Image (cartoon, rainbow, N blue to C red):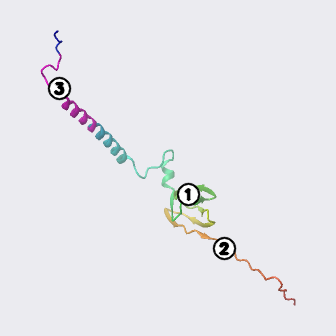
Amino acid sequence: MAQPPTDTDGKPVNSVGRVLDSRWMMAFSVLAVLVAIAWALIERDPGAPPAGMPAEDVETMATVELLGVPPGAEVSLDGRRIENTLFGVAPGTRHALEVTDGKGRSWRQVFLAEGSLSLVVELRTQFVEVEVSPNGVKAEED
């Protein structure tokens, strides 16, 4: 019985060329993605305001950075808890900061920010001095 002719009769299959072509296409695709990411990062302005905040509000904000805040410490700005140690505040107004940790140590600072400000946090245990008289001692009478 005779076999029907096929396209590969008498010719070696060129599978190496097909694999090589697909590798080049994959490399080109990866390169295109990397170029798109680099372009997006170059175009993004590092000083651009966060989404939803007008640019004029950001330009008038004073930046405050807290240095030395231990992990797990709670930071409060004007009585409200904040999550970041770098934040913006309205300049020219008085603000109160408080940092506390689970060991009973705290730090408080009232400041007036203009431009940028870095504050070093040094947590301390607060002591209260109480004068106690020993039992059995009578007070002097005049």
Amino acid at the residue labelled 3? Val
Residue 7, image quadrant:
top left
Q: Read off the residue under disc 2.
A: 127
* Contact flag, marks 2 and 3 (Cβ < 8 Å): no
- Is residue 9 depicted above or below 136 in this figure? above
Residue at 64%, 71% in the rendered image: 126
Q: Read off the residue under disc 3.
A: 13
Q: Left or right: where does residue 3 sit relative to residue 101?
A: left
Amino acid at the residue labelled 2? Phe
Quarter of the image with the C terminus is: bottom right
Examine the structure image and report whether residue 105 is included in the region drawn in magenta: no
Disc with the residue nearer the chain's start (3 vs 1): 3
Q: Secondary structure at mark 2?
A: loop
- Is residue 26 depicted above or below 45 in this figure? above
Q: Nearer the viewer, mark 3 or mark 1?
A: 3
Estimate the spatial distance between the alpha carbons at disc 3 and disc 1, rounded to whole Å.
73 Å
Question: 141 or 17: nearer the eye?
Answer: 17
Q: Secondary structure at mark 1?
A: loop
Question: 56 or 27: nearer the eye?
Answer: 27
